[in-house]
Structures are given as C-alpha cells and as structure tokens.
Image: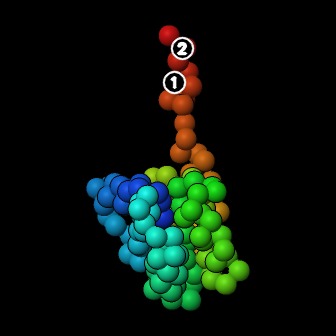
C-alpha cells in the first residue's frame, strides 16, 4: 500500500489531516511532519527519511508538501533519486482526499500521483464564476 507523507511549514499538514479526520477519517499509513522556524534542518531531513522508510512497504510513498522551493520540498527533492517517492507541491485538501480515494481503489504510486494533480487543480474554483454570477 502506498504511504502518504504530508510536510509543511508550520502546522498546515497537521491541519489538513485534522480536516480529513472530520470528513473521511485519517487514512492509514499517513504521517505528517511540520517545520517550525526554530527547527534544525538536519533533524528535519532525518525525520523525513525515517518517515519514508517507515511508510514504504515496497509500493512507495506519495509526499505532499506545501510549496515549491520551500525547505520541505527541497529536502524531499534530494531524495527523489534514492527513495521510491513521488513529490507533489501545493498540498491542499482535495489532493489528500483524491490520494485516499485512489489508493482505496488499489492503484499504484504513479496513478495516485496523477489523480492527485488532477483533483488538486480542479479543487480550486471561483464560486462566483461557477454560479455564473456577475461581480458586484
């Protein structure tokens, strides 16, 4: 089963997982790691590696981070050549729900990654435009 690792600056990843718990429950084989201003980057890197190793049972790990170019993203980018991971930036709630749903259907890491990208993008909607309402 593909593991999920959510990484963020501050408590964003914990907050998204808490929202999941309210709506769909917390997906199994899911971990969050947060980065605070005072945290040691070397320890953060070690935590990421340990979490990936713990979550990967051979099917790989989908790592979702808050922002491209941030420390969580950069630390994981360095692992793309040595660990069986896929890395997505712009983590949002629709992405997490899509990952959970797609994994429950027995899909592999690549399929889950592609499905998440699709739903993360489609989860950003202007409600005014969707309802065809004019601006005030």
Q: Position of residue 20 (x, y in %)?
A: 36, 58
Pointers 2 and 1 in contact (CB under 8 A)?
yes
- Residue 70 in view (yes/no): yes
Q: Position of residue 38 (x, y in %)?
A: 41, 62
Element assignment for label 1: helix
Mark identifier at residue 23:
none
Instruction: Identify the residue at horizontal 63%, vertical 83% (top origin).
Output: 83
Q: Which residue is situated farthest in the left direction here?
A: 22
Instruction: Identify the residue at horizontal 32%, vertical 58% (top origin).
Output: 18
Relative to 31, say whether 18 is above or below.
Answer: above
Marks counted in the figure total 2
Instruction: Identify the residue at horizontal 64%, vertical 77% (top origin).
Output: 79
User: Nearest the camera: 76 or 118?
Assistant: 76
- Which residue carries the number 1 mark? 128
User: Nearest the camera: 10 or 43?
Assistant: 43
- Residue 5 in view (yes/no): no
Instruction: Identify the residue at horizontal 32%, vertical 64% (top origin).
Output: 25
User: Nearest the camera: 112 or 31?
Assistant: 31
Crowd band around label 2 with a 10 angstrom C-alpha radius: few (<14), some (14–19), many (20+): few
Element assignment for label 2: loop
The tag earlier along the polypeptide, 2 or 1, is 1
Q: Which residue is situated farthest in the bottom direction here?
A: 58
Q: Which residue is situated farthest in the top direction here?
A: 136
- Which residue carries the number 2 mark? 135
Crowd band around label 1 with a 10 angstrom C-alpha radius: few (<14), some (14–19), many (20+): few
| Image quarter of residue 19 | bottom left
What is the spatial separation of the Cα atoms under label 2 and label 1, in whole angstroms?
8 Å
Q: Position of residue 17 (x, y in %)?
A: 37, 61
Relative to 33, say whether 3 is above or below.
Answer: below
The colouring scheme, among rainbow, by chain, secondary structure or one colour, is rainbow
Q: Position of residue 53 (x, y in %)?
A: 50, 86
């Amino acid at each position: 089963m593909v593991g999920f690792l959510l990484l963020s600056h501050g408590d964003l990843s914990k907050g998204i997982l808490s929202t999941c718990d309210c709506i769909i429950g917390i997906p199994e084989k899911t971990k969050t790691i947060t980065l605070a201003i005072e945290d040691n980057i070397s320890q953060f890197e070690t935590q990421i590696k340990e979490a990936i190793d713990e979550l990967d049972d051979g099917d790989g790990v989908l790592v979702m981070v808050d922002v491209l170019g941030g420390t969580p993203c950069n630390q994981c980018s360095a692992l793309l050549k040595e660990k069986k991971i896929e890395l997505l930036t712009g983590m949002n709630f629709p992405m997490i729900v899509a990952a959970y749903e797609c994994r429950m259907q027995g899909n592999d890491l690549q399929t889950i990654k592609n499905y998440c990208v699709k739903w993360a993008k489609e989860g950003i909607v202007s409600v005014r435009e969707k309802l065809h309402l004019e601006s005030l």
